[in-house]
Image: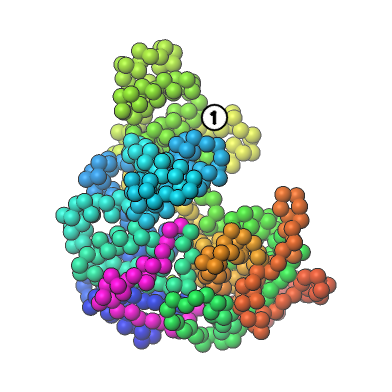
Amino acid sequence: MAELNPPQREAIRYLDGPLLVLAGAGSGKTRVITQKIAYLIEDCDFPPASIAAITFTNKAAREMEERVGSLLTHRSGPSPLISTFHSLGMRLLRQECRALGYKPGFSILDATDCFGLVGELTKTVDKKVVRAVQSQISSWKNALVSPDAAVSVAQGETEALAARVYRDYEATLKAYQAMDFDDLIGLPVRLFEEHPDVCERWQNKLRYLLVDEYQDTNACQYRLLKLLTGPRAMFTAVGDDDQAIYGWRGADIENLRGLPRDFPKLKVIKLEQNYRSTVRILKAANTLIAHNEKLFDKTLWSDLGIGDPITVTVCKDNEHEGESVVMRLQAHKFENRTRFADYAILYRSNHQARTIEQYLRDARIPYLISGGQSFFDKAEIKDITSYLRLLANSDDDPAFIRAVTTPKRGVGTSTLEVLGRYAGERHISLFAALFEEGFAQRVGARQLEPLLEFGEFMNRLEWRAKKEPAGPVLADLLAAIGYERWLFDHEEARAAESKWANVQEFAAWLTKKGDEDGKTLVELTQTIALINMLEKKNADGGEIDAVQLSTLHASKGLEYKHVFLVGVEEGILPHRESTAPDKLEEERRLMYVGITRAQRSLHLSYCERRKQAKEWIPCEPSRFIEEMGKEDLRISGGKQSAPPEKQEVKKRFGNLKAMLAGGGPGPGSGS
Ligand SMILES: Nc1ncnc2c1ncn2[C@@H]1O[C@H](COP(=O)(O)OP(=O)(O)OP(=O)(O)O)[C@@H](O)[C@H]1O
Ligand SMILES: [Mg+2]
């Protein structure tokens, strides 16, 4: 407890009832959670398995696991449960799903799978409509609105359509023995409400709960939290209302406001010292967020020194911005003798990453991306996981269709249509239907043969997939379906190579996971949907020295020595669809999150124009730059000052070249 300030220590030791730690960015809220877990185990003799900590992302969960692990090095045996709400829900459902009419092998459909399903049910090819319907259904699910209730609350055409689709969507998922991400929270809530005995069992099992990033919980998660803690209400929640950035996904700041109302005994502790950022960075963040309506009074100070001014670079267009950010990063790294991993480049939307990636690749700078397209979203990975899903759950019709048609094995669309109709009449899955005599009578022997062969192959493999270690079973599966050959027959050589490399990486990862955790292929399958990034570690086990590229949303809770925040323009940040007053406040919080990720230096940039559908559109600097208070900003570039900025970069690179020629950097200002 040495490295803790008095309110942090108080928060850690407080066990008399529910506790809320409410504090600004970088004030050590996450550290309170980590240390409190150690305190509960070490000093209060809580069995590790009776403690659950909930983080916002898988990455945060892994980091916390590592930190807790290093605090408890001398202990072996079970560890506390550290996971996201979704992983916790999944764990719970795996054990209890029979009470809700699910088999333990239930499938988890990711957002892309669900998009396909909603698309089919909506009967439209207009992706915008499908997306709107999908997002509306998700909002209802997160707000605990049932399909029946949705019909009566729906307003306008899209919502009415969504309400109609909602019921079919739920029924279809159930028929597939499948769940979407929202179900991983919603179904445990239903389970606990319908089965108080099960709820009580879990309340006794989990005796202390800790929740990080509490401001971004939604109504459903809040309900789950209340059910899990029960009347004892032994929990610590930490959060910052100024960092609530997931309103668009159903998170509700009301849950923060409602906490004192629902728990009259709630104790609130505030933390005021920021241990992350220099004074200038913190001041800019505080000045900016003061433009939002205040929910709670908070102060935040730092004694880490005044620090460098915040730079604002005006760029001609986004190509120039990409080039400039990479050049400035290289120069900064050289001057300060830092590592690539000390840098993050943050942006509002995924598409902004493309240009930056290009310039990073050209400069041969290693980088990692988070918050982007998931590895598991790639077609080749989804092909393979469809087999795994089907092995775990033979009711998973979407998985069946993908697996039976990829690679092609002579099963045509018309046969599948007959199979679908037959299965529908009999109310059974496609997989079960293919073995039935009634179906065999409707198709010719030539059509039936490849289907039966596939079915028998899967049946033979299922037994092994449920019993044997994952690695060898997966290797045999890949060989048996001839996936590699099929890729090279159907794709250009280079595309096929890269896809096959991805499949191999995936197989190696699953094998390793299986070996580490002693899990079978079927057991691992459910985890796949929940993981959005491979744990990239290099051969010696350390983290790769790479620049981190991330959306602002995905950067929450993390910190980097030096941060480049790009595209700080009207229309991007704030986003053009979010300029209504309440949405604007969320955009401002997003900017606040971005600024407060930086420890030592912060570099903003924006473009004077951007290309949109072949046309150049002039851009305005984001209002948030103005709102940060100008005195600590150093603005360079742009029309008036274009030459000096160029000179500046040239000068620095001139130096760089001279220094390189001279064999090494001069004294740096430290990292
Ligand atoms: N008492 C302390 N003494 C020294 N360093 C501390 C102390 N408390 C926290 N820190 C450090 O300050 C940094 C910020 O802490 P932490 O990430 O826990 O803040 P946070 O409040 O969770 O931030 P965010 O709101 O961004 O999630 C971390 O590097 C942490 O190790
Ligand atoms: Mg935190």
How far across and down, in percent of the image, does residue 511 sit? 41, 45
Q: Quadrant of residue 570?
A: bottom right
Quadrant of the frame with the C terminus: bottom right
Quadrant of the rendered image containing residue 298: bottom left
Residue type at mark 1 is Trp
**Looking at this view, is 557 or 640 the one in front?**
640
**Vertical placement of 242 versus 437: above or below?**
below
The answer to whether residue 638 is seen in the rendering is yes
Q: Is residue 37 visible?
A: no
Query: Which residue is drawn at the image coordinates 62% and 60% (left, top)?
Result: 576
Residue at 37% in and 48% down: 152
Residue at 33% over, 65% down: 53
Residue at figure coordinates x 45%, y 36% from the top left = 121
Percent position of residue 136, x then y: 45, 50
Q: Is the CB–ligand 2 distance for label 1 below 8 Å?
A: no
Q: Residue furthest right?
A: 643
Residue 571 pos. (x, y %):
64, 62
Q: Which residues are magenta?
A: 249-277
Looking at the rendered image, the quarter that the N terminus falls into is: bottom left
Numbered circles on residues, count:
1
Q: Would you name the residue on which mark 1 appears?
A: 486
Residue 168 image point, x, y percent: 38, 38
